[in-house]
Image (spheres, grey):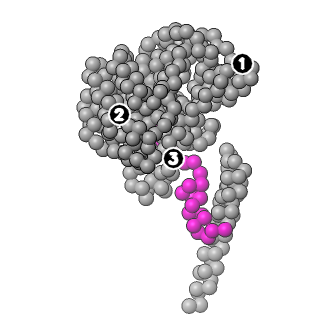
Amino acid sequence: MGQSPIIAAMFLALHILIQIALIVRVLLRPHREPASRIAWVVVIAAIPVAGIVAYILFGETNVGRGRVERVHQVLSQLPHVSEAVGAEGTNLPSSVPEAYAHLFQVGKSVNGFDPVGGNQAQLMEDTNETISSIVADIDAAKDHVHLLFYIWLPDNNGRKVVAALTRAATRGVICRAMADNLGSHLMIKSEHWRVMRKAGVRLASALPIGNPLLRALKSRIDLRNHRKIVVIDNHITYCGSQNCADPEFLVKAKYAPRVDAMMRFEGPIARQNPIPVRQRLDDRSEGRYRRPAKTTHNLNSVRIYRSGNRHRADSSLLSHARDFHLAHVHRPPRVSHFNPVLRS
């Protein structure tokens, strides 16, 4: 009984020390908005124990050290886009109005890509048209298809893409597909996933969770790979906010119909969106930079740059970079902004 006050005082002192340590970390951690710093300081200081637990689980962008190390290893062995066969085809003149030059400079500061001309772009009309167009392009693919979706459902549209990839792989086209382990768990666990694998499609599950309790100790479960991108033969690329699913979106019918923005680009810009889907490091030379870029009529200037919770030095961004490079597309004189990181 006499030791109870001493033990209580020790726990209180430990709690205060942890609070101070976390508050200092919040204030000194880079790439955090001032409002976010203030909010977390209040949460940690005002809510005993729970505030500390909340910060440990959700306060920092963290996908796990092991994943980040694999990211650096893979990226270090991938060729730069400028070293691609036929890369001279991407050096087409581009015209960037001075009023929008700073937007392209921001993009270049992230991954070094310059705007390129000689592209065609089409804003897709609706979800079904987008899927039909993707399927048609996959059916016409000659060399490779790279595909990533956050939500890929085994519904009508989802099965259409499965069938197209299966046909392409059967005729010898290198097909790589990746889906988020959480957003696409219905597809990953379905027979359709096994059919694609059996046909030769190289499949990967992004950011697998495994045991939720153990995963929470290593990284944040809520950080997902939200990208929706397709690259075909290094000449056609899709990017935007649309997942691979029916507009009725039966898994969350109350949010239906889904209204998303998706663009189809054709031309050298596709080389800035290569999507290095890699299940094995020895895949890195296959189906990525084989076909020379074709020249189409000029679409002013276009460039692709990636984004995430942080634009630089961020483990979540690096994890996504291993899988796919994409984010905001700017087209002067009118700027169209698509953010596939925040789009679902």
Residue 41 falls left or right of residue 77: right
Q: Decide: is 325 above or below 255.
A: above
Q: Which residues are magenta?
A: 46-75
Distance Cα–Cα, label 3 vs label 1: 36 Å
Circle 3: residue type:
Leu
Q: Is residue 278 visible?
A: no
> Disc 3 designates what residue?
223
Question: Where in the figure is residue 70, as x and y percent of width and height?
Answer: 48, 38
Q: Residue at x 36, y 21 (%)?
A: 136
Decide whether the magenta segment is chiefly helix, strand or loop: helix
Element assignment for label 2: helix
- Looking at the picture, tell me which residue is in the foreground, 150 or 77: 150
Residue 49 falls left or right of residue 132: right
Q: Is residue 49 visible?
A: yes
Crowd band around label 2 with a 10 angstrom C-alpha radius: few (<14), some (14–19), many (20+): many
Question: Where in the figure is residue 206, as x and y percent of width and height?
Answer: 42, 40
- First-in-chain label (3 vs 1): 1
Question: Which dot, 2 or 3, sits closer to the camera?
Answer: 2
> Disc 1 designates what residue?
97
> Disc 2 designates what residue?
157
Question: Where in the figure is residue 255, as x and y percent of width and height?
Answer: 46, 46
Distance Cα–Cα, label 2 vs label 1: 39 Å
Distance Cα–Cα, label 2 vs label 3: 26 Å
Q: Residue at x 67, y 44 (%)?
A: 31
Circle 1: residue type:
Pro
Element assignment for label 1: loop
- Looking at the picture, tell me which residue is in the foreground, 280 or 117: 117
Circle 2: residue type:
Asn
